[in-house]
Structure formats: structure tokens, C-alpha cells
Image (cartoon, helix red, strand yellow):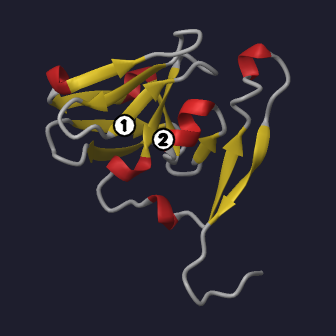
Amino acid sequence: MAERRNAKCHCGAVAFTVELTDGLNTARRCSCSFCRMRGAVVVSAPLSGITVTKGEDKLTEYRFNTGTARHFFCSVCGIYTFHQRRSNPNEYGVNVACFEDVSPFDFPEVKVMDGVNHPMDGESGVFGYLTFREKGEQQA
């Protein structure tokens, strides 16, 4: 059974439900120019897995480069909510910070995908890993 979560932007103008592909296990970031600046941790959902329950008219779309990926933001507070992926147009990447009771800092290690050398353009894969440890926590 797929995991469902409630999500919203910072100001609450946009709210949505998400049916995740594999819970929070798909957490990752990307190294492309846009994702580097955005800095969000995302998880995967099928295109049928997002239902906007409030504020669909408040969503703003941004596309760049090839124009394939569709990035959605709240037009009121500016928070990135989700995007239709270029690497897999049949799924969304969803900002985990929009979920109730989830923070990007809940993930001790997050895979970073090579978005500079995009999978749709040839060789690509894992670029590296971002780690988070609490102040005073020993490094392994």
C-alpha cells in the first residue's frame, strides 16, 4: 500500500496530498544549476500521486533549459512544492519540507544525483552524498 502524506507551502495557500512511490526512501537532491540554488530534498511520486486540495490557482510554473521539467511554486510565499521530472516525466519530485512533521534535516545522508550531466543526455548517476549530523554528534 502506497504511503499518503499531506503537504502545503509555507503560507498555506497551496495544499496537496501525495501518494509516495516508496515512502521517504527515494530522498535525493540534484546538482543541476536550478536545484543547487533551490537546495530542496525531494522524494518520488507518480504523476497520479498528487492531488492539489487548495490553491491550484496559486501555483506558478517555471521551466528552463529544455523546458521539459515543470517546477511548481506557491505564487504567494514562493515555496517550491513539486516538479514533474525531466529524468522521468511520469513522476514528480516532491519537496519533503512541505510534508507535515518532516524536515530535510531528518535525513542523515541524502544522495545527490548528477543533474549537470543529466540522465536524459547520457551518462549520469549519483554525484555524491550530503550528510547532516547534529551539533556535538561524532563523525563516523
Local packing at callout 1 (Cα closer than 10 Å; few below 14, some 14-19, many 20+) is: many
Q: Circle 2 sits in a helix, a strand or a loop, which is it?
A: helix
Residue 122: give x, y in percent of width and height. 83, 17
> Label 2 near label 1: C-beta < 8 Å?
yes
Asked whether, in this view, residue 1 is left or right of residue 16, the answer is right
Instruction: Point out the tag, 1 or 2, that comes first from the N-terminus.
Output: 2
Judge by depth and name the residue closer to the eye, 102 or 2: 102
Q: Tell me the residue that label 2 is attached to.
A: 38
Q: Residue 102, located in which quarter of the rendered image?
A: bottom left
Judge whether residue 42 can be spotted in this image: yes
Q: Residue 57, located in which quarter of the rendered image?
A: top left
Tell me which residue sits at (69%, 31%) in the image.
115
Tell me which residue sits at (57%, 48%) in the image.
27
Judge whether residue 26 can be spotted in this image: no
Q: Circle 1 sits in a helix, a strand or a loop, which is it?
A: strand
Amino acid type of the residue that numbered disc 1 sits on in the rendered structure: Tyr
Structural distance between the alpha carbons of marks 1 and 2: 8 Å
Q: Tell me the residue that label 1 is attached to.
A: 80
Q: Is the residue 35 above or below the residue 47 in the image?
A: below
Amino acid type of the residue that numbered disc 2 sits on in the rendered structure: Arg
Local packing at callout 2 (Cα closer than 10 Å; few below 14, some 14-19, many 20+) is: few
Residue 37: give x, y in percent of width and height. 52, 40
Quadrant of the image containing the N terminus? top left
Tell me which residue sits at (33%, 51%) in the image.
99
Asked whether, in this view, residue 11 is left or right of residue 102, the answer is left
Residue 84: give x, y in percent of width and height. 47, 22
Judge by depth and name the residue closer to the eye, 7 or 123: 123
Quadrant of the image containing the C terminus? bottom right
Q: Is the residue 68 above or below the residue 61 in the image?
A: above
Tell me which residue sits at (39%, 22%) in the image.
48
